[in-house]
Image: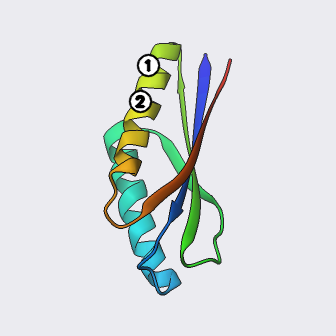
Amino acid sequence: MVLGVLTLEFFLEYSHSLKEKRRFLNSFTGRVQHRFNVSISEIDFQDSWQRSKIAVAIVNSQLSMVQQVLNKILEEASSCADAMLSGHEINYYS
């Protein structure tokens, strides 16, 4: 079994409150969970209204499948219009 963990750090330039940040996070995390069947959660900057760090986790028996899914999620995060992807990291555990 292979566990893949993708961390995404977003900068929300146009967010002026935690409510606006939450709207983006709920939309993004819901879309990613539904489309890719992964676990996803905000792991840092919960009290900051312009920054967010999200972790995405997936388990599969094939490393290539884990890599493919995490790369697709990274592409989707890079193309978000509401937030700028300011950093990411991918780790694999077997």
Residue assigned mark 2: 69
Tag 1: Cα neighbours inside 10 Å, few (<14), some, or many (≥20)?
A: some
Q: Image check: 73 left or right of 89?
A: left
Q: Amino acid at mark 1?
A: Met
Q: Amino acid at mark 2?
A: Val
Tell me which residue sits at (40%, 68%) in the image: 24
Give SS at disc 1: helix
Can you say whether 48 is above or below 56 in the image? below
Spatial separation of the CA atoms under disc 1 and disc 2? 6 Å
Percent position of residue 61, x then y: 53, 14
Please tell me which residue lies in front, 4 or 88.
88
In contact (CB < 8 Å): disc 1 and disc 2: yes
Q: Residues within 10 Å of mark 2 (few under 14, many from 20)?
A: some
Which quarter shows the C terminus?
top right
Left or right, 3 with reference to 17: right
- The residue that mark 1 highlights is 65
Disc assigned to residue 36: none
Q: Residue at x 55, y 79 (%)?
A: 49
Is the residue 25 above or below the residue 29 in the image?
below
Looking at the image, which is closer to me, 40 or 78? 78
Query: Residue 53, position in %: x, y?
Result: 60, 58
Residue 86, x across and y down, in percent: 53, 56
